[in-house]
Amino acid sequence: MPLGPLLLFGNQQASNPGASVLTFYCNDPIASGSNAGTLQQTVPPASTSTTGWTVGTQLASPYACQVYNTEIGGAQFTATPKPDVPPVNSAEDSWRFGPSTGTFSLGTWYSSISVIAVTSGGDQDGRLRARLWRSPNPTGTPATEITASSGVMVGTTVTNLSTTVAQSSSASARIAAFFISNEYIFYQVAWEITGVGGAADRDVLVRYGSMGATDGSGLVTAAFATATLSPKGGAAYFKRRRMTDELCYADDL
C-alpha cells in the first residue's frame, strides 16, 4: 500500500461525511485531446519521465514552465516568475485529471514534484512553482484558477540535485470550497532555479511513483464529494454538495 500522502503531508485533511481526500499522481501518456500529461488516481511505477528542464549554469532568468514530455533548454527560461498565465498550447505546461463532477471542501491542497538529474548533476538547486485550474474543456480554455486566492504554490528547495538520488519539492495552499460540473483539473507546473549548476548540461527531470519521501509527483486534494447529473421532471438537474462550516450537505437543484 503506497504511503506517499501520509509520509509527505501527514493526514490532516478534514473528515466530511460523504467526502474523501483524493490523490492524483503525475504519469504518462499525454492526456487525450490536449498536450497535458496525465493525472491519475492509481500509483504509477517509479520511473524518470522525459519532462523537465536543462538548468545549466545561469541564474539571471530562473523561471520556466514545463513542456510535457520535453526537456526544455535555457532559452525558455525567463526573468518573469512562472506560471503567470492560464495553461497554454492545449495545456502543455500542465498535468490533467477528469472530467468529474462534485464539490471540493474548504481545505488544504498539497502538491509535490519529485526530480532527479539525468545528464549531469551534483550542484543545481531549485523548487516547484504551481497553480491549479479547472476548465470544462480538455485543452484548459477557458480556465478558472483554483489557487486565485492563495497565489502561486511555491515548493521547498531542492539542493545539490544528483543523478543518483531523487528529491521532492513540496508546497501547500488553503483553498476555498468549489463545485465542478463535468470539468477537468489542471496542475500547472514551473521550475525556479535557486542555485546555479556547475556545467551547461545540468538538468532536472520529473519522477513518477508513489509520492513518498523522494519519488513521485502529483496532488493531494481537500475532501471531495461526487455529484451526479440526473433527469428530474423531464429536465436535467444536479445533485450538488453545498459546503457550510466544512460540513457537506446534499441539495437537489
Image (spheres, grey):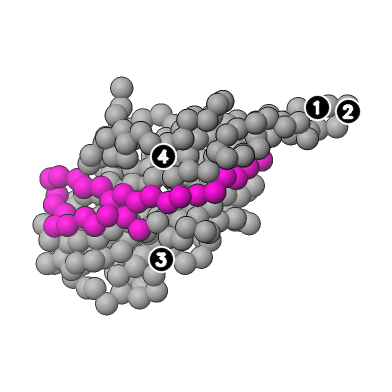
- Mark sitting earlier along the chain (3/4): 3
Q: CA distance from mark 2 to mark 4?
A: 38 Å
Q: Count neighbours of disc 4 (C-alpha within 10 A) and say few if under 14, some if 14 to 19, many if 20 or more.
A: many
Residue carrying label 1: 231
Quadrant in the rendering for residue 40: top left
Quadrant in the rendering for residue 77: bottom left
Report whether residue 199 is seen: yes
Q: Amino acid at mark 3?
A: Lys
Q: Which residues are magenta?
A: 154-181
Residue carrying label 3: 82
In the structure shown, which secondary structural element does the residue marked by tag 2 occupy? loop
In the structure shown, which secondary structural element does the residue marked by tag 4 occupy? strand
Tell me if 219 is positioned left or right of 90 in this view.
Answer: left
Q: Amino acid at mark 2?
A: Gly
- Res 234 label: 2
Most frequent secondary structure within the magenta stretch: strand
Is disc 3 in contact with disc 4, using a CB cutoff of under 8 Å? Answer: no
